[in-house]
Image (spheres, rainbow, N blue to C red):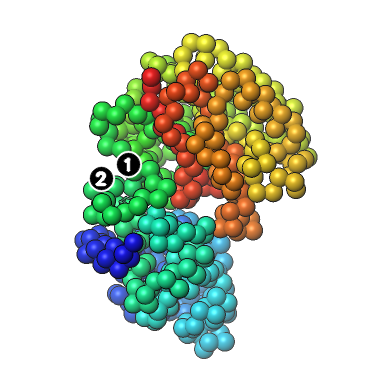
Amino acid sequence: MDIESFLLALEHEVADYKAPVIDLIGVQTQNPFKVLVATIMSARTKDETTARAAGRLFDEAPDIHALKGLSEERIRELIHPVGFFKNKAKYLYKLSEALKPYAYKVPDEIDELLKLPGVGRKTANLVLSVAFDKPAICVDTHVHRIMNIWGFVNTKNPLATEQALRTKLPQKYWKKVNSVLVPFGQIRCKPVGPQCDSCLLEQSCPKNGVNPRRIKNAGSGTLKFISWNVNGLRAVEKKGFIDIVKGSGADIFALQETKAWPEQLSDEVKNIPGYSSYFAQAKKKGYSGLAIYTSKKPLNIITGLGMDQFDDEGRMLTLEFETFFLVNAYFPNAQHELKRIDYKIEFNNALFEYLKQLANKKTTIICGDFNVAHKAIDLANPEANKKNPGYSIEERTWMEKFINAGWVDTFRVFNQEPEQYSWWSYRFNARTKNIGWRIDYFVIDEKSKSWLQDADILTDIFGSDHCPVQVELKPG
Ligand code: SF4
């Protein structure tokens, strides 16, 4: 591929887009301190949120000396609601102490920047590039993703992409690559449903691993379903959830672990244009819970399994449509030392019976967080987890029995590769290192297997410790 022509074409295209917030702050302030602070705040946060939080913080702390005078609590108040604001407030609180050896100036060398609290390679490279105009390649999720889509690199994580770009990409594009690909990735080549139909690279892009958006009513008859354990719907709303749904082209978007009663949710998240939304919640506030957004009106809504011990925990929500049932389930976690394994297996068996009844009537699709990796290929460290929740023999045996009874794990119909995961621990940088588990599934009854068109894991979507999974079906 001709990388230079791709980047030059896009440079013109993104000139009309909104510039990334860090570029704006760099141009407007020419101030390395502000670029560094805003970059620390910007990780996993929408640009608008970062811009507002940076504005509040810089009003009170326009330089490092003023920042030194703020308590950690005050910094926290000022930067809320950027993602991970508690950790980021901690980093910013420690920043003045960390800058002491540099006479309270931001260093302009990568190794020194990496010693600062909250500064990883992405932040350090962005600061070098924007604040000091030095050649640096800032590889965020968009740069990593798009370079792989184009086949310019073939890498598993942003660090490997940065290393590959250092050898392959002409240096004159190092600084440009982030300012071009971030807005392009946010607006056109989105992680979910990239707009290939209106992309100027449509003819020449190899579209590796891409599932382009489908224009609704295009008459294809294919339905797209997405399922995501959001680990808190209110939290993920702040990380761009509504735009993700709007850009997904999904006919049905199912969520688990919403951790909210509908009355605790904003009107915006309850009323996403083009969708009706349905909720099931636990009795206990802030725990479990499900939601389904659907562009088609269901015939019938069934909340729970009809068993109080499970329904009180908000674990099941079924929508009935003319030709199929969609069952959204949040399976219990067996918990440390398998304390809840009996409860979990009881739930699984009750669900099994329920699904059999539905499948006798019409096509039945079940999606959700099953809280189990089925086989060794479905987790990074099978040996070490043989007795742990999510991979215990009891859970694996149940899953095997379920699949053998005539249910199809849709993802494995299309993909037999290892290292395909949908959940990563928040600890140990597990997602970056891809030390994960595949515990989120779309399963369909075997009689309806001919409906299957495609299945995928949307690893480029962030905002939760899970990523979404997807299936495309063509009712036959
Ligand atoms: S054609 Fe599609 S996949 Fe390729 S760059 Fe454009 S939007 Fe991205």
The mark found on residue 197 in the picture is 2
* Residue 129 appears left or right of 90: left
**Side (left or right) of 347 relative to 232:** right
Q: Residue 201 at what x, y percent from top left?
A: 26, 55
What's under tag 2, amino acid-wise? Asp
Seen at 56% across and 40% down, the residue is: 416
Whether residues under marks 1 and 2 lie with C-beta atoms below 8 angstroms apart, the answer is: yes
Q: Quadrant of residue 395?
A: top right
Residue at x-position 29% and y-position 29% = 220
Residue 2 position by quadrant: bottom left
Instruction: Kindly identify the residue that appears in the image at 46 percent across and 36 percent down.
Output: 455
**Residue type, numbered disc 1:** Arg
Disc 1 or 2, which lies upstream in sequence? 2
Please tell me which residue lies in front, 441 or 47: 441
185 shown above or below 368? below
In this rendering, does residue 177 appear at all? yes
| Quadrant hosting residue 307 | top right
Question: Considering only vertical position in the picture, is 312 above or below 338?
Answer: above
